[in-house]
Amino acid sequence: MVKLIGYKKIRTAVFISGTGSNLKSLIKFSKTKKSPISINLIISNNAKAKGLKLGKINKIIKKVFIFKKKNKIENQILSVLKEHEIKMICLAGFMKILSENFIRKFKGKILNIHPSLLPKYKGLNTHQRALNNKEKYSGCTVHFVNSKLDSGKIILQKKVKISKNETKDSLAKKVLNQEHKLYPKAILKMFNL
């Protein structure tokens, strides 16, 4: 568990690739009194990510890195994180897999949110796979990131009932609504708050 030093909020970077709906809920949460984090940096691998607009609206520095040479790019990201004194990373729909070397530098300080009840349905197309297997429940998981895909220690999960006529899109919407609530709760749990 991470210990809070005094009352200073932990400087956090959020990594995104898309719409940034989880980023939006994390920004909202970070502005509350009980939040142990402040969001100081947004990193994306996609210059067209809609979530980048949230940086402008909330006056948060944003940086885009196009992953051509992974090691080189990761080193650039690490130096930006250092420059901004980032102590924690929240992955929120970030569609790139970070290397073991990168993860080691932030060991125990990188969280991810995944749209399934891990260890089931790691990786992509989680909702369709849950429907194909006639699951009764799906959900979302916040976990620590380690070098194996979607395999880190689970912090919190939230179950969602799959209804009879569920589609991939309706399930995705249901799960996403829960993600927005679960991520802040998982952060509070991580800091024993």
Image (cartoon, rainbow, N blue to C red):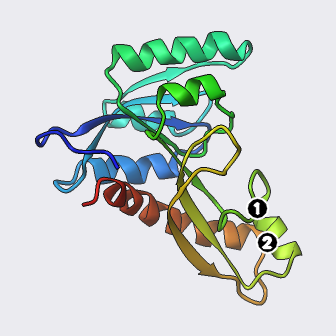
Q: Position of residue 18 (x, y in %)?
A: 61, 41
Q: Position of residue 103 (x, y in %)?
A: 56, 31
Q: Is residue 128 above or below residue 50?
A: below
- Residue toward you, 128 or 20: 128
Q: Quadrant of residue 45?
A: top right
Q: Residues within 10 Å of mark 2 (few under 14, many from 20)?
A: many
Q: Position of residue 127 (x, y in %)?
A: 75, 66
Q: Tell me the element at label 1.
A: loop
Which numbered dot is residue 121?
Answer: 1
| 147 sits left or right of 4 in the view | right
Q: Quadrant of residue 118?
A: bottom right
| Contact check, label 1 and label 2, Cβ < 8 Å | yes
| 176 sits left or right of 109 in the view | right
Q: Residue furthest bottom?
A: 164
Q: Quadrant of the C terminus?
A: bottom left
Q: Residue at x 31, y 45 (%)?
A: 2
Q: Residue at x 50, y 51 (%)?
A: 21
Q: Position of residue 163 (x, y in %)?
A: 71, 87
- Residue toward you, 151 or 47: 151
Residue type at mark 1?
Answer: Tyr
Which numbered dot is residue 185?
Answer: none
Q: Residue furthest left?
A: 6
| 71 sits left or right of 7 in the view | right
Q: Is residue 95 visible?
A: yes
- Residue toward you, 166 or 72: 72
Q: Residue at x 87, y 76 (%)?
A: 133
Q: Quadrant of residue 13?
A: top left
Which numbered dot is residue 130?
Answer: 2
Q: Is residue 165 above or below residue 173?
A: below
